[in-house]
Image (spheres, helix red, strand yellow):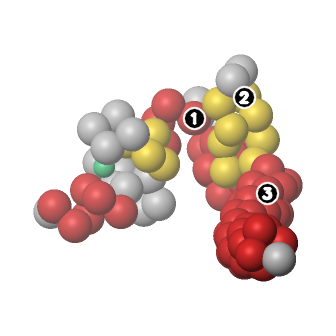
């Protein structure tokens, strides 16, 4: 009987551990689903030029000014500019959010 009681105890412990693992796994799945959803939404707002996904706002600027995406890319901070120079397109000091913070 002692052995059976030990087995049951062991199984209970395993069950408890499995439940914790399952809860963790569900949390991970939930997060991944959210990430996937966010990515899907983002992709809808992008146009891929070459291999680069370009946000629609930038694409609109490209069309408005007839300029390539490179003009709207901050090479210093590796992100899109979100503010155009007040004298754009005559002067190209466009700012990304990091440029503004460090200005
Ligand atoms: Zn920048």
Q: Position of residue 90 (x, y in %)?
A: 37, 44
Report the residue at 68% width, 38% height from top. 53
* Residue depicted at 65% across the width and 30% down the height: 52
Q: Is residue 49 left or right of residue 98?
A: right
The N terminus: image quadrant: bottom right
Query: Where is residue 47, by image quadrant?
Result: top right
Judged by depth in the image, the label closer to the viewer, 2 or 1, is: 2
Q: Which residue is mark 2?
A: 49
Q: Quadrant of residue 2?
A: bottom right
Residue drawn at (42%, 62%), measured in percent from left and top? 83
Q: Give the CA separation, mark 2 to mark 1.
A: 9 Å
Question: Which residue is the site of mark 1?
Answer: 69
* Residue 36 position in % (x across, y down): 79, 57
- Please name the residue shown 15% across and 63% down the image: 103
The foreground one among 63 and 70 is 70
Q: Work out how far the residue at label 3 is from the one at label 2, CA to CA, in angstroms.
A: 22 Å
Q: Secondary structure at mark 2?
A: strand
The answer to whether 94 is drawn above or below residue 100 in the figure is above
Q: Are marks 2 and 1 in contact (CB under 8 Å)?
A: yes
Secondary structure, mark 1, is helix
Mark 2 nearby-residue class (10 Å; few <14, some 14–19, many ≥20): few
Q: Which residue is mark 3?
A: 36
Q: Say left or right for 44 vs 99.
A: right
**Nearer the camera: disc 3 or disc 2:** 3
Q: Earlier in the sequence, mark 2 or mark 1?
A: 2
Mark 2 CB within 8 Å of ligand 1: no
Q: Are marks 1 and 3 in contact (CB under 8 Å)?
A: no
Task: For marks 1 and 3, give the one nearer the viewer.
Answer: 3
Q: Is residue 45 visible?
A: no
Which structural element holds mark 3?
helix
**Which sits in the foreground, 92 or 100?**
100
């Amino acid at each position: 009987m002692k052995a059976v009681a030990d087995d049951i105890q062991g199984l209970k412990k395993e069950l408890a551990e499995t439940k914790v693992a399952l809860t963790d796994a569900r949390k991970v799945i939930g997060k991944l689903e959210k990430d996937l959803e966010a990515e899907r939404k983002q992709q809808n707002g992008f146009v891929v030029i070459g291999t680069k996904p370009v946000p629609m706002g930038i694409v609109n600027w490209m069309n408005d000014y007839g300029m390539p995406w490179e003009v709207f890319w901050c090479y210093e901070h590796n992100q899109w500019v979100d503010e155009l120079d007040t004298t754009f397109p005559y002067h190209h000091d466009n700012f990304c959010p990091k440029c503004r913070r460090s200005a």
